[in-house]
Image (cartoon, rainbow, N blue to C red):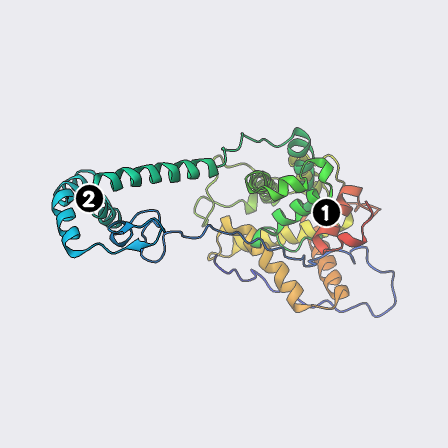
């Protein structure tokens, strides 16, 4: 994955000289979220460094006879010579190996078998049949087709993919599949919704759920990106020559104020349980500013928009690692600039989000343990 640098620089915003009421944006910006790593395992290679199947024989396993004690006995020289003359089918083994194009290790095993007596070959065949039956019994039947429940698929995944992407404290939209992990973490916290311990422990079922989450996040990011682009107005709509911009059907944009833009995003994503808040306006203003910077930079690639957004948020976290007030002032200035550029609007009077938004914000900031169910 390529590394993306910030598309513009953040300027320091000094605090006001006189004491004022704390900004309603103090809880916004780019809090980082904890990373959860997933490590898969792969089956071990049973064929050994030489690549030979251990179930195939070698000559040393098959050419000796055994006494009643079970210990191998070394035949006398004359016995070995007469056995080789009577039972050696090397030519036939070479012919059969060429006909079916055996691998070298399998060819060697067949040559070893060709030197056995008829009784030994019969016993070896019986042993191989028993071994094959043992392997067949060990093979688990294929899992029946499993589908996500309607409650989990249509209700919870749809709602919380929207809530996470619209969170004003989301630290990463696409990097390291962070958004997918956050949504999965919310679902895992409520096993009664359908993402139970049994589903999480079953790789086949878990992958189906994670794939669904990932697909819906991709769809919703695409919706948000298009709505933000159209909100810039007709003057800033990119032409077909912009790197990475290949619209199926170009649309005419309309300059939109920030509150209406947030409402349009929620409507496009069918986020019926979310409301526009001041913090959301601040985050969306930053998303729109990043979009404009990409369109004005001839070296930036439009299709990598969300990676540039992640780079901007990382820059903000890195520049002010322990100064949330400084971050809040920068987001507020970004919002003020947006209001001047795209028209003033009455910002929401309340900063309190809906319950679903509070859950998404807690997941994004790693504060699940302090959140009451």
In front of the other: 67 or 301: 67
Question: Which class describes the residues within 10 Å of circle 1: few (<14), some (14-19), or many (20+)?
Answer: many
Instruction: Decide: is 249 above or below 40.
Output: above
Mark 1–mark 2 Cα distance, whole angstroms, equals: 69 Å
Whether residue 341 can be seen here: no
Image position of 125 (left or right of 158): left
Rendering coords of residue 244 (x, y %): 46, 48
Whether residue 234 can be seen here: yes
Q: Residue furthest front?
A: 68
Using the rendered view, name the quadrant where residue 148 is placed.
Answer: top right
Rendering coords of residue 263 (x, y %): 71, 39
Image position of 110 (left or right of 86): right
Residue to which mark 1 is pinned? 360
In front of the other: 21 or 172: 172
Q: Quadrant of the C terminus?
A: top right
Q: Count the marks: how many? A: 2
User: Mark number for residue 291?
Assistant: none
Rendering coords of residue 88 (x, y %): 15, 45
Q: Nearer the viewer, mark 1 or mark 2?
A: 2
Rendering coords of residue 85 (x, y %): 11, 46
Q: Answer whether labels 1 and 2 touch (C-beta < 8 Å).
A: no
Tell me what residue is drawn at x 43 percent, y 47 percent.
241
Question: Which class describes the residues within 10 Å of circle 2: few (<14), some (14-19), or many (20+)?
Answer: many
Name the element at disc 1. helix
Tell me what residue is drawn at x 21 percent, y 42 percent.
117
Residue to which mark 2 is pinned? 114
Image position of 251 (left or right of 150): left
Tell me what residue is drawn at x 22 percent, y 48 percent.
112
Name the element at disc 2. helix
Q: Mark 1 or 2 closer to N-term?
A: 2
């Amino acid at each position: 994955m390529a590394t993306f640098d910030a598309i513009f620089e953040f300027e320091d915003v000094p605090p006001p000289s006189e004491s004022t009421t704390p900004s309603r944006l103090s809880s916004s910006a780019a809090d980082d979220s904890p990373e959860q790593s997933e490590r898969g395992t792969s089956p071990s290679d049973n064929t050994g460094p030489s690549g030979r199947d251990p179930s195939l024989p070698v000559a040393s396993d098959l050419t000796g006879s055994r006494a009643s004690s079970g210990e191998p006995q070394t035949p006398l020289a004359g016995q070995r010579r007469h056995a080789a003359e009577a039972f050696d089918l090397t030519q036939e083994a070479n012919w059969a190996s060429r006909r079916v194009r055996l691998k070298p290790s399998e060819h060697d095993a067949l040559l070893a078998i060709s030197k056995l007596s008829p009784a030994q070959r019969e016993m070896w065949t019986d042993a191989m049949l028993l071994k094959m039956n043992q392997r067949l019994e060990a093979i688990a039947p294929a899992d029946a087709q499993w589908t996500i429940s309607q409650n989990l698929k249509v209700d919870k995944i749809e709602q919380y993919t929207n809530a996470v992407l619209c969170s004003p404290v989301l630290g990463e939209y696409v990097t390291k599949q962070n958004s997918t992990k956050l949504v999965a973490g919310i679902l895992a916290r409520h096993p009664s919704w359908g993402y139970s311990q049994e589903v999480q422990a079953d790789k086949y079922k878990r992958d189906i759920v994670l794939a669904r989450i990932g697909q819906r996040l991709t769809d919703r990011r695409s919706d948000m990106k298009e709505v933000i682009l159209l909100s810039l107005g007709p003057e800033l709509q990119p032409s077909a020559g912009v790197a990475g911009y290949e619209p199926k059907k170009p649309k005419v944009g309309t300059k939109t104020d920030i509150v209406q833009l947030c409402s349009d995003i929620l409507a496009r994503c069918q986020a019926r349980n979310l409301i526009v808040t001041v913090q959301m306006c601040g985050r969306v203003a930053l998303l729109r500013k990043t979009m404009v910077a990409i369109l004005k930079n001839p070296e930036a690639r439009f299709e990598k928009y969300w990676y540039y957004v992640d780079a901007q948020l990382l820059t903000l976290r890195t520049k002010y690692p322990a100064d949330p007030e400084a971050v809040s002032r920068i987001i507020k200035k970004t919002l003020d600039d947006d209001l001047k550029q795209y028209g003033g609007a009455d910002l929401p009077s309340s900063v309190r989000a809906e319950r679903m938004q509070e859950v998404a914000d807690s997941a994004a900031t790693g504060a699940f343990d302090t959140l009451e169910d």
